[in-house]
Image (spheres, rainbow, N blue to C red):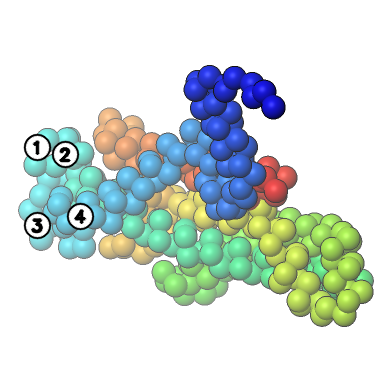
Amino acid sequence: MIEGPEPPLQLHSLVTENLANTEASDEVVPMWKQRTRIFIHNKLAVASVLFLLATVIFCYLGPLLYHSNQTNQAQALNVTFNAPPSLKHLLGTDSSGFDELGRIMFGGEYSLSLGMLAGFITIIVGTIYGMVAGFLGGIVDTLMMRLLDAFLSIPLLFLLITLIAVFQRSTIFLIVLIGVTLWFGNARIIRGDALLIKKLEYSQASTAMGASKWHIIWRHVFPNSMSNIVTVATFSVADAILFLSTLGFLGLGIQAPQTDWGTMMQAGSVQQSNGFWWEIYPTALLFVLVIVAITYIGEALRDAFEVRLLER
């Protein structure tokens, strides 16, 4: 038997490399890696995460490095009111004599903390309500949706103002109030997912095999609704921060000496005609950038949790 010439070494290496690449491409990539890859591909979302992280560090750890009084009245401290930026006060002082840069950190702690807590309540209540209504269907879904329509018919801002006027205002009350009044739209989105998923083949197969309704909700409806749940949760945090600032701008936010960005912007807008720009523009700019950053993160998370973009 006559043996043919051996393939060149370079060709042999190329074939081996191609075989290795083929084997590697056949490996199942974990979902968390796929989702991370999709999220990182969105450069604006990555920049938004870095900015939001920097803002959190600035608000929560900044006071440890930049010391300023934010609780006592300015008269007892003998400070200058509406002082322009200087080495002593990098962003000047406000109409109460508080250091403006320290005030932004102090108000940011309340705005971010209350917004995240209220957003968490919003998504929990909205998700449970929407899934139960959509999956059970029938008369239960009809009654729950008509009740939801009644809530949606009431202007949200007027509802918030009315409840604040009736009940005693406090930090805990504001968190609960915003959390239980912003979930209406979220529930409708999650309900739509539940209505669709319960009619798909795998849900019907589970029902035929005797699975309970709660088992199907937990194992099929909930995981396949995760894209919308994560997106809605992210936007709920932005909405909660926005509504908290709106109440603060109307003078119905956190009570002094505590503050939030909305209350600061309301106080700064009064002084804008006097040329005290440092009392409103830095706070307003940071507030707008935080809301935009959360929005970009929500859109990227929606794509990352979208099942159709994942490899099988």
> What mark, if any, has residue 77 been given in the picture?
3
Seen at 87% across and 80% down, the residue is 210
* Disc 4 versus disc 2: nearer the observer: 4
Q: Earlier in the sequence, mark 1 or mark 4?
A: 4
Q: Position of residue 275 (x, y in %)?
A: 28, 30
The residue to which callout 1 is attached is 87
Amino acid on which the number 1 mark rests in the picture = Leu
Amino acid on which the number 4 mark rests in the picture = Pro
Badge 3: how crowded within 10 Å, few (<14), some, or many (20+)? few
Kindly tell me whether residue 271 is visible in this rendering: no
Discs 1, 3 touching: Cβ within 8 Å: no
Residues at marks 4 and 2, CA–CA distance in whole angstroms = 14 Å
The residue to which callout 2 is attached is 90
Q: Say which quarter of the image contains residue 110.
A: bottom left
Discs 1, 4 touching: Cβ within 8 Å: no
Badge 4: how crowded within 10 Å, few (<14), some, or many (20+)? some
Q: Where 145 sits versus 48, above or below?
A: below
Residues at marks 2 and 1, CA–CA distance in whole angstroms = 6 Å
Discs 2, 1 touching: Cβ within 8 Å: yes
> What mark, if any, has residue 63 been given in the picture?
4
Residues at marks 1 and 3, CA–CA distance in whole angstroms = 18 Å
Amino acid on which the number 2 mark rests in the picture = Leu
Q: Earlier in the sequence, mark 3 or mark 2?
A: 3
Q: Secondary structure at mark 3?
A: loop
Q: Secondary structure at mark 1?
A: loop
Q: Is residue 44 found left or right of 192 in the rendered image?
A: left
Picture mark count: 4
Discs 4, 2 touching: Cβ within 8 Å: no
* Frontmost residue, 308 versus 21: 21
Residues at marks 3 and 4, CA–CA distance in whole angstroms = 18 Å
